[in-house]
Image: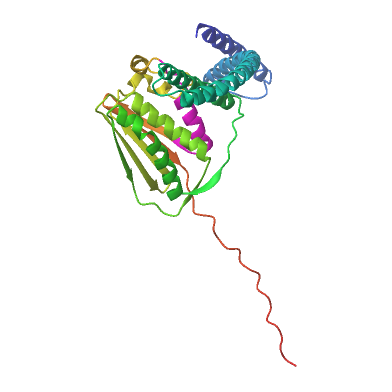
Amino acid sequence: MKNNTIVFIGGAFAGGIMEGIFLWISSAYPGEVVSFSLFEQSTLLLFILLGGVASLAFSYKKRFDADEGVIAKHQGDNKAKDDLISMTLHHIRTPLTGMMWSTKELSVETPADDPQKNRIEKLHEETVRILATVEKLLKTSRENNGRSSYCFEEYSTEKLERLISESISKMKPAAYAKDISVETETSPLSQKTAKIDGDKIITVVQTLFENAIHYTKSGGGIKIRMEEKKDGFLFYISDTGIGIPPDEQSKIFTQFYRSTNAKRARSDGLGIGLFLAKSFVDAHGGNITFTSSAQGTTFIVRIPISEPNNTIPKQEEKPPTDTTI
């Protein structure tokens, strides 16, 4: 701030000097009768302001050029770091996948009365958990490097609703195990369509539902609602959980960020689920928003929809055949 003030004063001083030079040149023509009193008052401030603004602009340009070089260097460093992380995660994923299937097979083959069976099952569960973590980190790395691949297909809103409902159904047992009720509601749907990547939408739904389970206490509830509006297909997921502190809500979609109360409730989170969910929804041309208080949180996902592309091409009309003899 201090440097900007000095630059502006210097520029203003230079502008005042330019004003003096201009008036001196103007007075070199004695043949012309010019009253400079009002003219001086109106132009002096203009020259001072122009001089100050020009100096500030030049100063900011120099800083921008310098910062641009630093940013470019940091971007290169970040890309190299992301590439190294991605390569390392790929190398970790391969043996972990082998361990997952080996422990699964070993668990199936071990008799139920064998004292080692419980340990084998625990080892399998931990392997699956670590592998899921590695997969999430890989997805994050791909998003950061712009290497995520999407396979968009045309879904009717009814098919999209079924996709989400089936995904929720598979996860309901985890909510019931924690004594959390799950309520689902769907408004009437039309025959409009949405272009989506089914796997990515499932990831978004699972992420939001898992978070609702993790941060809702036993005896709470989760409500799922789907409806179609003029501007898109809307998916709501509400919980009676711990909520997001107001002063931290602006950071909730930031990569690796977790709110303070989320860390207290669950220490093993990564803070990348909501980052990925937002990235996937954005790639669909939609948006994800939320409202939150101490009584719970509601996430709203909007996916664009349009009229189905089922128009039949108009056939070219042929001229009538002349049947006269």
Residue 262, quarter of picture: top left
Task: Identify which residue is drawn at 57% across, 23% down.
Answer: 98
Q: Residue 46: where, in percent of width, then height?
A: 55, 20
Task: Identify which residue is drawn at 33% across, 23% down.
Answer: 215
Does residue 190 appear to the left or right of 216 in the view shown?
A: right
> Which residue lies most toward the bottom here?
325
The foreground one among 266 and 66 is 266
Q: Residue 125: where, in percent of width, then height?
A: 45, 22
Q: Residue 89: where, in percent of width, then height?
A: 59, 19
Q: Residue 275: where, in percent of width, then height?
A: 48, 26
Q: Is residue 98 above or below residue 157?
A: above
Q: Is residue 36 above or below residue 283?
A: above
Quarter of the figure with the C terminus: bottom right
Magenta residue check for 64: no
The foreground one among 102 and 304 is 102
Segment tinted magenta in the rendering: 268-287
Residue 130 visible here? yes
Q: Is residue 219 above or below residue 45?
A: below
The foreground one among 73 and 43 is 73
Residue 19 visible here? no
Task: Identify which residue is drawn at 35% across, 28% down.
Answer: 212
